Amino acid sequence: MPVLRAPNASLYTQGGQRKYLTAAERARFLDAAEQCARPEVKTLCLTLAYTGCRISEALALQVGQVGMDSGLIAIRSLKKRSRTIVMREVPVPNELLVMLDAVHGVSTRNADACLWHWSRSRAWQLVKQVMVEAGIPSGIHATPKGLRHGFGLHAVNSGVPLNLVQRWLGHASMTTTAIYLQAMGEEERIIAARMWM
């Protein structure tokens, strides 16, 4: 059965560099985010890591989109070209919800209040700084987009069905999501290990 691929979609550059954080790098990023002295940077980094959303989607998040009772964060898909508002709900760890409430007052603030007030470029710099603190070597993978790809691979490695990964990442086509089946090296071995059990 052929692997579905979106045109020009790959987890690797033309020069063969990977575009994603490995499982070890993702774990170090999560640890560095947890240790971050600035609570609002910590919550941004953890939200990106646990939802796989784009940085612009995270910056557009409003208090009312954080489901304290449901355990979901509703993310508005900003990459959609149509005028229709497209939302997706992504389950997140309860610890993240508790942290969002403690730092951003989710349960007490106005529903349309934004969680973060940084520009996209400033937020990008803050996330990159946490990656440096995590000891992630520089490269195309050490970016918020690399974190998004790392989320997709982590979901596939954890046995999440591809259709759920597609929905959580907000991909219009399964062929886009199928790039996470291109895993090589350590990631491919993790997937194969599930088969050996």
Image: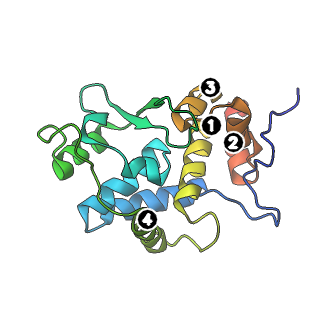
Q: Residue at x 24, y 47 (%)?
A: 99
Quarter in which the N terminus is drawn: top right
**Badge 2 is on which residue?**
180
Name the quadrant containing residue 170.
Answer: top right
Secondary element at image label 1: helix
For the residues labelled 4 and 2, the Cα–Cα distance comes to: 23 Å
Residues tagged 4 and 3 counted as in contact (Cβ below 8 A): no
Quarter in which the C terminus is drawn: top right
Q: Residue at x 70, y 53 (%)?
A: 186
Q: Amino acid at mark 4?
A: Val
Position in image of residue 86 (x %, y %): 48, 30
Secondary element at image label 3: helix
Earlier-in-chain disc, 4 versus 2: 4
Earlier-in-chain disc, 1 versus 3: 1
Q: Amino acid at mark 2?
A: Tyr
Binning the other alpha carbons within 10 Å of mark 1 as few (below 14), some (14 to 19) or many (20 upward) gives many
Earlier-in-chain disc, 3 versus 2: 3
* Of 34 and 143, the residue lying toward us: 143
